[in-house]
Image (tube, rainbow, N blue to C red):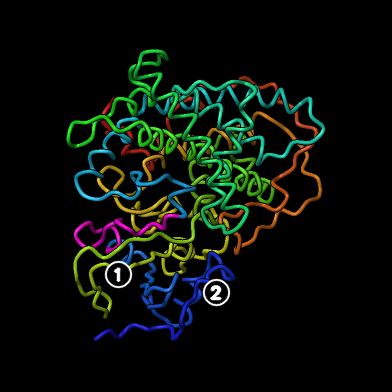
């Protein structure tokens, strides 16, 4: 017999849309319980919160991704039947392919491309009366993503492709027009990338043999068969789209630099290790994903409840990142908290939890950290700008959310300082220890 709280409702989907990111956290606080039952999308759902819940949630003997991610999210954000939906040996095999792309050499290349583009964009912005960072950084990151993966990108297509990748991200928590824009954007992107996959396989497009585009184009599944063209396109987009999505974090990072000038000064002056602490706090403090979904793989008991096979379970990402039992003063922005962070893959989950290599933690997390690090250094040390009066607040109901003004800058100018070599280098902070041991492609 279950002893956990249960909401007596026919369906809570509307409340989820109205409450947004804090939906699970609100009930955790109300029920004084890290686990409760409710109904979402007219089905029974168990909601879990906290570090211990995350450990259970990422146990492959207890949970699976099969049928856990709604079709509407697959058809916009990640693609139908992509790696995020896989389980077992098939998932481990494909995840190994993605992780083979996250080596120090490839992250060095990414940082070099980021540095080139930030230098170029500063010169561009110097000629502009007003810069909307959220939109401009999408274009910048789209150029980097395509150059890093080996995908050719025409100059006249930069804004279209960046907008499409951003639309896929913007659609994951949406209904109505935002959702349909995301679906149309995905169709365009899959058609475009599908053509590139075919050209690579036929030898009509020459790309470096160890480039991400080449690796995915010729990846073979556990049966030894090439992925079909559509699936290869989906998985290549699963490298391109997340890099463009870093624009959300960059924009929030710019807000944090503006609202915490001492932090900006520390980065500008090169305080050892501080930029990494700052980036991690941006990823913890500002909202991106509200929760994650799994289904129960095998019956088990935990937390006073019997988990029945096939039950949908949500893990509270936002609430866990703002849990006072884990983070002291969680609603304060304080980068130094990560000096004493225990490194647990189960309490710091902005891009999922568990192990990068064997589980469903985001393969591109190191890419996000590196791109954020380079971007924060440029925003602090290598450029100056004015921040006019604007609305830098953000909604906790809109999913995903971003500053309402999208961060407007004026009078942008480069500082003229030579870019130091450390901007190109993979961080030596503990967050990247796994990258050093990653297999080289």
Task: Give the magenta part as a residue range.
Answer: 56-71
The quadrant of the rendering that contains the C terminus is top left
| Residue 15: numbered disc | 2
Q: Does the magenta stretch include residue 379?
A: no
Compared with residue 412, is residue 200 higher up or lower down, i.e. above or below? above
Compared with residue 104, is residue 347 higher up or lower down, i.e. above or below? below
How dense is the environment of label 1, judged by Cα within 10 Å: few (below 14), some, or many (20 and up)?
A: some
Q: Which of marks 2 and 1 is nearer the N terminus?
A: 2
Residue under label 1: 311
Which residue appears at 24% of the width and 73% of the height? 308
SS state under label 2: helix
Residue 380 drawn at (x, y percent): 64, 36
The quarter of the picture where residue 42 lies is: bottom left
The quadrant of the rendering that contains the N terminus is bottom left
SS state under label 1: loop
Left/right of residue 272 with respect to residue 340 in the rendered view: right
Nearer the observer, 357 or 174: 174
Residue 320 drawn at (x, y percent): 43, 64
Residue 417 drawn at (x, y percent): 66, 22
Q: Is the magenta stretch mostly helix, strand or loop?
A: loop
How dense is the environment of label 2, judged by Cα within 10 Å: few (below 14), some, or many (20 and up)?
A: few
Left/right of residue 391 with respect to residue 20 in the rendered view: right
Which residue appears at 48% of the width and 62% of the height? 318
Q: Is residue 62 magenta?
A: yes
Compared with residue 294, is residue 34 higher up or lower down, i.e. above or below? below
Nearer the observer, 438 or 225: 225
Residue 390 drawn at (x, y percent): 78, 51
| Residue 327: numbered disc | none
């Amino acid at each position: 017999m279950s002893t956990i709280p249960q909401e007596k409702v026919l369906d809570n989907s509307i409340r989820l849309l109205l409450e947004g990111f804090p939906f699970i956290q609100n009930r955790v606080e109300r029920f004084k319980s890290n686990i409760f039952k409710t109904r979402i999308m007219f089905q029974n759902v168990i909601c879990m919160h906290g570090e211990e819940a995350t450990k259970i949630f990422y146990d492959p003997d207890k949970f699976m991704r099969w049928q856990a991610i709604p079709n509407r999210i697959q058809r916009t954000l990640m693609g139908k039947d992509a790696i995020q939906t896989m389980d077992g040996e098939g998932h481990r095999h494909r995840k190994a392919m993605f992780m083979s792309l996250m080596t120090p050499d490839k992250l060095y290349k990414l940082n070099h491309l980021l540095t080139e583009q930030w230098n170029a964009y500063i010169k561009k912005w110097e000629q502009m009366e007003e810069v909307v960072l959220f939109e401009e950084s999408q274009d910048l990151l789209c150029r980097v993503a395509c150059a890093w993966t080996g995908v050719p990108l025409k100059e006249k297509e930069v804004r279209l492709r960046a907008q499409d990748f951003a639309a896929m991200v913007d659609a994951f928590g949406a209904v109505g027009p935002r959702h349909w824009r995301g679906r149309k954007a995905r169709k365009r992107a899959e058609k475009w990338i599908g053509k590139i996959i075919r050209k690579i396989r036929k030898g009509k497009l020459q790309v470096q043999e160890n480039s991400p585009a080449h690796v995915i184009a010729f990846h073979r599944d556990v049966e030894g068969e090439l992925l079909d063209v559509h699936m290869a396109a989906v998985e290549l987009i699963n490298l391109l789209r997340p890099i463009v999505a870093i624009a959300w974090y960059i924009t929030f990072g710019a807000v944090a630099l503006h609202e915490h000038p001492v932090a900006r000064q520390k980065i500008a002056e090169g305080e050892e290790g501080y930029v990494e602490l700052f980036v991690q706090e941006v990823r913890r403090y500002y909202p991106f994903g509200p929760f994650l979904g799994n289904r129960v793989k095998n019956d088990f008991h935990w937390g006073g409840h019997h988990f029945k096979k096939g039950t949908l379970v949500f893990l509270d990402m936002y609430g866990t990142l703002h849990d006072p039992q884990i983070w002291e003063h969680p609603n304060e922005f304080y980068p130094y908290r990560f000096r004493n962070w225990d490194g647990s893959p189960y309490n710091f989950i902005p891009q999922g939890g568990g192990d990068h290599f064997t589980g469903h933690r985001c393969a591109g997390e190191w890419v996000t950290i590196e791109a954020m690090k380079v971007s924060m250094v440029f925003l602090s040390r290598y450029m100056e700008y004015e921040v006019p009066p604007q609305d830098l607040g953000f909604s906790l109901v809109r999913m995903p959310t971003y500053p309402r003004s999208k961060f407007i800058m004026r009078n942008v100018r480069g500082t003229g300082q030579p870019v130091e070599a450390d901007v190109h280098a993979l961080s030596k902070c503990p967050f990247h220890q796994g990258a050093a041991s990653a297999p080289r492609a």
